[in-house]
Amino acid sequence: MNDFDLDRKLKAARVPARDEDYWESFPRLVLAKLRTAPVESSFERHWWPRLAWGGSIAFACLLVGFAIGHWHGRMEKNDSFVLLQNRKMLREVLTLFPNRVRAIVQDKHGLQLVLSDQPDVPASTPLWVKICDGKQCASLVTFSGQELEIAGQKVTVLADAQGGIILEGSRFVWSSTAQNFAQGGLKIEAKRLPSISL
Amino acid sequence: MGDTDEEKVWVLQSRNGDPAAFESLVRAHQRMIHSLTFRMTGSLADAEDLAQETFIRAYRQLDSYQGTAKFSSWLYRIAVNTCLNWRKREMRREQAHTHWAASGAARRTEANSPADNDELSQCVQAALMKLPPKQRAAIVLTVYDGHHHAEAARLLGCSETTVSWRVFAGRRKLKRLLNVKGGRNE
């Protein structure tokens, strides 16, 4: 069965008809309910799902953090470059949080997963970025269009159509293809990683 | 349905507490909302409950309607969310559909049966009910109500990619379910 046949079959399924009396009385029924139904407090309506959702996200982050940490500890070569470019790890994290992973960051605090509240991170080629400011370094895998806090400043990571990567911070702009941008005393490396298919 | 001047007046009057104006809004959109809630629930009784709930929520949230989107789109979004939040009754309905699938098409005489005298409608609705709610919503919005994936994404509050994936996965499952049922029934 192709999509056309499926759509034809789906559309052939009718919604059961109701008689005109029903349509005549329904609006009045709604108004009657409006007069009698108690007003639901928005706090009561919203706090429990939010708490449950927040708790689930926090628990999942803990699990992922623990798994990554455990895995990290077992790796012979304890190198952020190798770890963050591990396709298996990336795939698992992206599968666990579809369209929510904004970045996986490794800095002096260890590995952190930066998640979006909404599943609004479009699937795209992962980008690996390393920034050192002389005192500390941060490596991360992220996606084009993400604004992140790296090495103490807000940085927007962008991929251009020519395969280059552009980093735009409050005090610098850097491009992997044109090195004459101001780097603000930062040492920056960036490259595209192979696409991850989920 | 575009917002007519008359409809804008009804919205304003409803905000000011005029029940007749809100009744006119309900009258104008009740069939669209019932159709959506039936596709999402597979039950006339539950569809009616959810349609009522949608209009009641809409009335209470009228102050948040900015008028930038069409009133019908705003209302439709409330209905979709109401359906997606429908949990307990959905479980009950899924059990009923499982029972129906196991016992063949012998439920046509039941008073609340979703599509009396129409086995195809019943099969399709039963297959729809086997989809996860978000996949079902994506199919209903795009196939039945003709929304583009971008519009469906706005209504569902997710990305276009997510809608495309849900439609793809939903279609795949529906093809499998309806092929099996078609093989039995044809």
Image (tube, coloured by chain):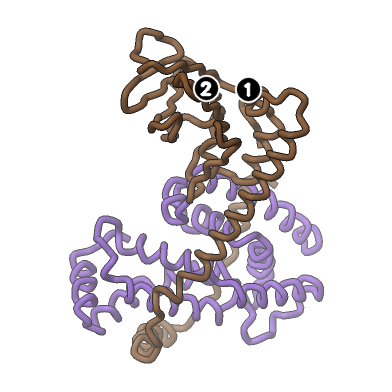
Q: Residue furthest front?
A: A135
The amino acid type found where label 1 is placed reads Phe
Would you place residue A130 above or below residue A182 in this image? below
Would you place residue B106 above or below residue A177 in this image? below
The amino acid type found where label 2 is placed reads Lys
The colour with which the image depicts chain A is brown
Disc 2 packing (10 Å; few <14; some 14–19; many ≥20): many
List x then y, in percent, for residue A124. 54, 31
Residue B67 figure quarter:
bottom left
Q: Are marks 1 and 2 in contact (CB under 8 Å)?
A: yes
A39 relative to B17 in the view: left or right? right
Element marked by disc 1 = helix
The colour with which the image depicts chain B is purple
Q: Quadrant of the C terminus of chain B?
A: bottom right
Give the residue drawn at x 52%, y 44%.
A115
**What residue sits right under mark 1 in the picture?**
A81
**What residue sits right under mark 2 in the picture?**
A130
Disc 1 packing (10 Å; few <14; some 14–19; many ≥20): some
List x then y, in percent, for residue B155. 43, 56
Give the residue drawn at x 66%, y 75%.
B93
Q: Chain of mark 2?
A: A
Depth order, front residue of A181/B88? A181
B115 relative to B182 in the view: left or right? left
Residue B72: mark? none
Give the residue drawn at x 37%, y 83%.
A39
Q: Quadrant of the N terminus of chain B?
A: bottom left
Would you place residue B76 above or below residue A138 in this image? below
Q: CA distance from mark 1 to mark 2?
A: 9 Å
Mark 1 and mark 2 on one chain: yes
Depth order, front residue of A25/A185? A185
